[in-house]
Image (cartoon, rainbow, N blue to C red):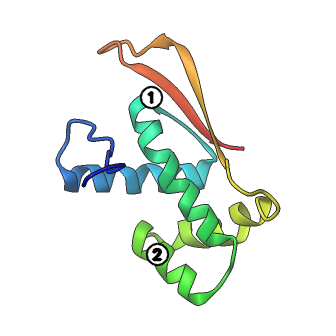
């Protein structure tokens, strides 16, 4: 059975989607807040939340797991040293999606901010 197997497809191939989510998660860790389409923000949220949960316990194994998902040494270092210690006492809900009233000019796509709480 394929219950609970839904992923956001984003109308791209699987390799493109993986690269897109990886790049967006690196940018969110670096900047703390990014602006993107609403569908991309919804697809990004569970990935970043799992990375922050992983980074709450600083170990070599967890750093290697995070590096395998992000493939960016600077982002992994910032995740473990700056981002995750803020959420030590929090049990989840590390990100917030805020919808923007205006649509994107080129294609009228719904736009949102995703930010770390």
Report the quarter where the N terminus lies: bottom left
Q: Residue at x 46, y 38 (%)?
A: 42
Q: Earlier in the sequence, mark 2 or mark 1?
A: 1
Q: Residue at x 26, y 41 (%)?
A: 9
Side of 19 relative to 48 (left or right)? left
Q: Of all residues shown, which one is farthest toward the front?
A: 1
Disc assigned to residue 38 = 1
Q: Residue at x 54, y 61 (%)?
A: 50
Answer few, some or many: residues within 10 Å of disc 1's Cα (few below 14, many 20 plus, some between 14 and 19).
some
**Is residue 98 in sight in this rendering?**
yes
- Which secondary structure lies at badge 1? helix
x, y percentage for residue 74? Answer: 54, 70
In this rendered view, identify the residue nearer to me: 83 or 54. 54
Answer few, some or many: residues within 10 Å of disc 2's Cα (few below 14, many 20 plus, some between 14 and 19).
some
Residue underneath mark 2:
67
Between marks 2 and 1 in the image, the one whose residue lies nearer the viewer: 1
């Amino acid at each position: 059975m394929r219950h609970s197997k839904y992923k956001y497809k984003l109308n791209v191939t699987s390799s493109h989607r993986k690269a897109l989510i990886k790049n967006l998660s690196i940018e969110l860790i670096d900047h703390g807040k990014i602006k993107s389409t609403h569908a991309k923000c919804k697809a990004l949220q569970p990935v970043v939340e799992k990375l922050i949960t992983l980074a709450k316990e600083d170990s070599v194994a967890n750093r290697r797991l995070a590096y395998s998902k992000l493939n960016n040494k600077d982002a992994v270092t910032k995740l473990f040293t700056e981002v995750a210690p803020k959420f030590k006492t929090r049990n989840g809900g590390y990100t917030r999606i805020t919808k923007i009233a205006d649509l994107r000019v080129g294609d009228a796509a719904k736009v949102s901010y995703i930010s770390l709480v």
